[in-house]
């Protein structure tokens, strides 16, 4: 007789072992180690909620503190590795295998642990890809999640930073796994129910509120004139040209400069209401002046941003907020919006090769890429037409019933310390060899990139008809890097005549007018002022 | 620190009555540019003091492009550089030459 409920029986055994540790669903912080030891079995797939912003830091530390004699060989399936404890589990021998998406702050240590053999990497995923695998072959057996508050029945309020919680809990709870939540406070009634209590097995109040990283805040004081120039080129040469209304911005100063030029430069070009109206975007503080100027109709967010809570609450027509007034973010759904419902992704990178492949991986650092490959790729399953998408398809010479997403890589030809952004060969290849990865960790594939924007010009790769043209178009905006200096000057001038390469002068921009005076906010204090005092920057961004 | 010197065939001599002009600030990643009239037989002389060592060929390429754009002569350009990228160097030189000559390229 075949047994059809082994997962349920195994779950029941785990819950039996944990009996007596909880009052209802509530577990005392001091008992967390005992709880984890009893419900986790060696070799389990475990998901620690690691978002861009809110972190299940108390649970992650508790997991790393377990005795590897009891708990070992865990397979961690976790989107973001942000905290030291996320790697301590491997160093301690509690876990041995990792499938993930992004590890920015821990990238160097991750590379060291890998080379010393203390962990094996399954794959580096995009967010949607990893979430998809939670529902196929990487379903977590135990998940350690994070919420702002819980009631005694386990109903969770995740606050503005809902992020990954719904995806993780759904995958785990509906396959008879165990869900443990750390919360900042236990309340009689949560402001709204983000996760129903019957999907949550245990709740522990963290001794300290969970850590939140203000990942998307950029101080306007640090934006350079070159970034202003590139932002002008983006707005006039791409946003206005294609009439891009639905978009996602990557993280960084290049795109912050664009956000801060909307109410000034874009307004002067008469573009309000014609570009940048609908966004898949974290609530960037740099977007405040554009929102106040009436540029922005809606923003759906992957996660929130520290200090933006009151501003968001006061702008419910713009942000997605609950009946309680606070924002509801959702990484999986915002990534879906970025992939299928945006006409453009524009973001920075660290290296671009002669095929237009773009990567943030550099030697000795395994950083992953989070969501950029989803946003920065053509969605071949897309079936609705918009003018920018159709025009991009026409420019690419496609057969008339298919458009293209605009995927723009925006990069100064030299990074700090004169590191060239254009290279013959991406570090990603060597990294893949060293780390034994199946694939080089390329963030955006060259055949998805439609435009490369540097201070020297815009290369429209859609208009290139041969690999040789494409290479010269890339060299033609690569400035004084070795790749740029090796250009065929005649070929590049020919591409310029055809509008494949456009210099600032070709789009009617005088670089001498690119000054910081164009920024709608020049400092953090200006952003606070623009928000009417509603934006409350984290301490590290306050200089007054 | 590295000291570099370049000379370029100039274009139209800049009127010697032009006063020396100083453009830019010496902050990290930035540079200051002093432009002054000089009797150089119509040529342009550039002296660079830079914190970043080993980029002489890139300076040569950037400056050659700038003075191909700006057909000026009989000027001495002194650059004090704190690790500016070529993009910043070109932008600052355009501003400096515009300040000095009172016109565009």
Image (cartoon, coloured by chain):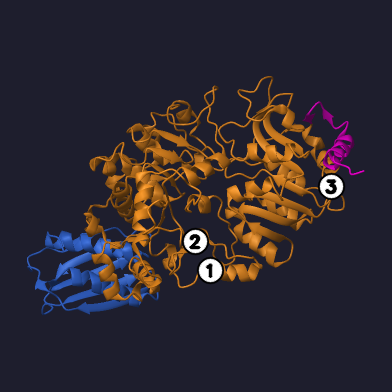
The segment highlighted magenta reads: A1-27
What residue did someone put label 2 on? A445
Residue A511 x/y as whole percent: 25, 57
Place residue B91 in its image quadrant: bottom left
What residue did someone put label 1 on? A427
Give me the C-alpha separation between circle 2 and circle 1. 14 Å
Examine the structure image and report whether residue B102 is included in the region drawn in magenta. Answer: no
Image quadrant containing the C terminus of chain A: top left
What residue did someone put label 3 on? A41
Please tell me how crowded label 1 is: few (under 14), some (14-19), or many (20+) other residues with Cα within 10 Å: many
Residue depicted at 54% across the width and 22% down the height: A323
Residue depicted at 32% across the width and 71% down the height: B49
Question: Label 2 lies in what chain?
Answer: A
In the picture, the disc for residue A180 is none
- Which chain is blue in the picture? B
Q: Earlier in the sequence, mark 1 or mark 3?
A: 3
Q: Are marks 1 and 3 in contact (CB under 8 Å)?
A: no
Give me the C-alpha separation between circle 3 and circle 2. 39 Å
Residue A544 seen: no
Relative horizontal placement of residue A173, taking residue A234 as reference (left or right): right
Q: Secondary structure at mark 2?
A: loop
Looking at the rendered structure, whether the residues under marks 1 and 3 are on a common chain is answered as yes
Q: Are marks 3 and 2 in contact (CB under 8 Å)?
A: no
Q: Secondary structure at mark 1?
A: helix
Residue A121 x/y as whole percent: 69, 60
């Amino acid at each position: 007789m075949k047994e059809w409920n082994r997962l349920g029986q195994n779950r029941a055994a785990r819950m039996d072992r944990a009996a007596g540790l909880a009052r209802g669903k509530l577990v005392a912080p001091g008992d967390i180690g005992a709880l984890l030891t009893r419900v986790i079995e060696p070799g389990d797939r475990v998901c620690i909620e690691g978002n861009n912003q809110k972190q299940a830091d108390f649970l992650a530390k508790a997991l790393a503190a377990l005795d590897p004699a009891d708990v070992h060989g865990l397979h961690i399936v976790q989107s973001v590795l942000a905290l030291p404890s996320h790697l301590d589990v491997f160093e301690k021998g509690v876990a041995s295998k990792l499938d993930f998406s992004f590890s920015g702050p821990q990238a160097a240590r991750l590379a060291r642990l890998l080379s010393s053999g203390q962990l094996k990497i399954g794959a580096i995923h995009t967010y949607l890809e990893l979430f998809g695998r939670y529902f196929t072959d990487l379903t977590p057996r135990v998940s350690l999640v994070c919420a702002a508050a819980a009631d005694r029945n386990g109903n969770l309020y995740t606050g503005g930073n809902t992020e990954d919680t719904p995806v993780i809990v759904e995958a785990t709870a509906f396959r008879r796994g165990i869900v443990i939540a750390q919360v900042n406070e236990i309340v009689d009634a949560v402001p709204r129910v983000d996760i129903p209590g019957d999907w949550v097995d245990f709740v522990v109040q963290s001794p300290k509120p969970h850590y939140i990283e203000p990942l998307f805040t950029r101080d306007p004081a640090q934006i350079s004139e070159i970034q202003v120039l590139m932002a002008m080129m983006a707005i006039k040469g791409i946003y206005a040209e294609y009439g891009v209304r639905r978009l996602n911005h990557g993280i960084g100063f290049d795109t912050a400069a664009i956000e801060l030029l909307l109410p000034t430069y874009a307004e002067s070009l008469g573009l309000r209401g014609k570009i940048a109206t609908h966004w898949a975007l974290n609530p960037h503080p740099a977007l405040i002046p554009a929102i106040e100027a009436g540029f922005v109709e809606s923003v759906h967010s992957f996660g929130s941003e520290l200090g933006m809570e009151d501003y968001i609450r006061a702008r419910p027509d713009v942000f997605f907020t609950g009946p309680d007034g606070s924002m509801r973010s959702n990484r999986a759904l915002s990534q879906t919006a970025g992939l299928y419902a945006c006409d453009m992704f524009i973001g920075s990178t660290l290296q671009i090769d002669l095929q237009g492949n773009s990567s943030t991986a550099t030697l000795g650092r395994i950083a992953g890429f989070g969501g950029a490959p989803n946003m920065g790729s053509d969605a071949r399953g897309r079936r609705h037409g918009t003018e920018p998408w159709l025009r991009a398809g026409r420019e690419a010479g496609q057969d008339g019933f298919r458009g293209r997403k605009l995927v723009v890589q925006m990069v100064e030809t030299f990074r700090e310390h004169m590191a060239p952004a254009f290279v013959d060969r991406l570090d990603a290849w060597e990294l893949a060899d060293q780390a034994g990865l199946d694939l080089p960790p390329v963030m955006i594939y060259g055949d998805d990139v439609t435009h490369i924007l540097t201070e020297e010009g815009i290369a429209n790769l859609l208009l290139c008809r041969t690999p040789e043209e494409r290479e010269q178009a890339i060299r033609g905006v690569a400035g004084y890097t070795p790749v740029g200096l090796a250009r065929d000057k005649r070929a590049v001038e020919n591409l310029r005549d055809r509008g494949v390469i456009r210099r600032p002068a070709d789009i009617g921009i005088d670089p001498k007018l690119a000054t910081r005076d164009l920024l709608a906010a020049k400092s953090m204090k200006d952003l606070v002022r623009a928000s009417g005092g509603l934006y409350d920057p984290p301490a590290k961004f306050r200089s007054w | 620190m590295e000291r570099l010197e370049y000379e370029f065939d100039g274009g139209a001599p800049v009127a010697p009555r032009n006063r020396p002009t100083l453009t830019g600030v010496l902050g990290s990643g930035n540079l200051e540019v002093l432009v002054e009239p000089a009797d150089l037989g119509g040529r342009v002389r550039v002296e660079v003091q830079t914190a970043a060592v080993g980029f002489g060929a890139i300076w040569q390429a950037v400056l050659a492009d700038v003075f191909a754009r700006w057909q000026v002569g009989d000027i001495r350009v002194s650059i004090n550089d704190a690790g500016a990228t070529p993009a910043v160097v070109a932008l600052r030189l355009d501003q400096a030459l515009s300040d000095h000559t009172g016109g565009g390229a």
